[in-house]
Image (spheres, rainbow, N blue to C red):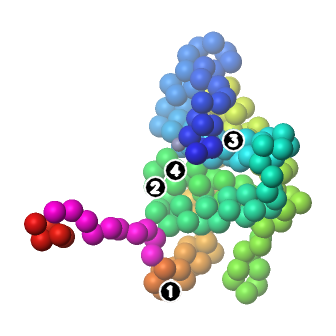
């Protein structure tokens, strides 16, 4: 829900007054916008916790957020959401917001998360505001892909028969009508 609300935050027109962010960032506009909505959705959770509107532990939200990346990336990294996911995954990894342990599990580093969330938000909003097409192209080329280690871990999920999604058999023909 916060992802969708976060689409309404941020910058629509570049700060040079030359037009929209969408026009400036061309084929990368959607991927960056989805990345913005994801990360600012988490920003809103932080703000609501500070105001006391939410009362749970921020660690729960951080953990769910990281776990959500693993869930989403199983649909692939080809579309705008997938690219945004991988940029965020690789960015967080570089900033030690999480780490992979020797036993093949992943651990969230709560003390590093806030700085990583803030700096990635800053990066995305700045790229959008500047309409920096080359900067976004570089970010996507460097970080918008599934790395070798992650792919191996995703293959483990597949081998363990953990479904990517649930499909309901429903409708008139299923009912025999
Ligand atoms: Zn979205």
Dividing the image into 4 quarters, which one contains the N terminus? top right
Tell which tag, 2 or 4, sits nearer the viewer: 4
Q: What residue is disc 3 on?
A: 40
Residue 133 placement (x, y as % from top left):
59, 33
Element on which disc 1 rests:
loop
Q: Is residue 105 above or below residue 80?
A: below
x 76%, y 38%: residue:
122
Q: Residue furthest right?
A: 111
Asked if residue 101 lies in the magenta stretch, the reply is no
Is residue 165 a member of the stretch shown in magenta? yes
Q: Which residue is mark 2?
A: 78
Residue 103 lies in quadrant: bottom right
Magenta-highlighted residues: 163-172
Element at label 2: loop
Task: State if disc 4 and disc 2 touch (CB < 8 Å).
Answer: no
Q: Earlier in the sequence, mark 2 or mark 3?
A: 3
- How far apart marks 1 and 2 lie (CA) works out to 23 Å
Could you classify mark 1 by the number of other residues whose Cα lies within 10 Å: few (under 14), some (14-19), or many (20 or more)? few
Q: Is mark 4 within 8 Å of ligand 1?
A: yes
Q: Which residue is mark 4?
A: 81
Q: Is mark 1 within 8 Å of ligand 1?
A: no
Viewer-proximal residue among 117 and 22: 117
Residue wearing tag 1: 160
Query: Which corner quadrant of the image does residue 21 belong to?
Result: top right
């Amino acid at each position: 829900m916060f992802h969708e609300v976060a689409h309404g935050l941020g910058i629509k027109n570049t700060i040079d007054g030359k037009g929209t962010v969408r026009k400036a960032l061309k084929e990368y506009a959607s991927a960056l916008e989805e990345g913005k909505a994801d990360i600012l959705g988490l920003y809103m959770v932080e703000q609501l916790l500070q105001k006391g509107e939410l009362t749970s532990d921020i660690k729960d939200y951080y953990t769910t957020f990281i776990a959500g990346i693993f869930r989403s990336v199983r649909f692939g990294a080809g579309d705008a959401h997938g690219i945004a996911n991988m940029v965020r995954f690789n960015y967080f990894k570089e900033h030690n917001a999480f780490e992979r342990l020797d036993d093949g599990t992943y651990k969230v580093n709560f003390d590093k998360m806030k700085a990583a969330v803030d700096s990635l938000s800053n990066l995305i909003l700045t790229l959008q505001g500047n309409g920096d097409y080359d900067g976004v192209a570089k970010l996507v080329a460097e970080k918008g892909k599934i790395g070798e280690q992650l792919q191996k871990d995703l293959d483990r999920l597949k081998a363990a028969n953990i479904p990517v999604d649930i499909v309901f058999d429903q409708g008139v023909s299923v009912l025999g009508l």
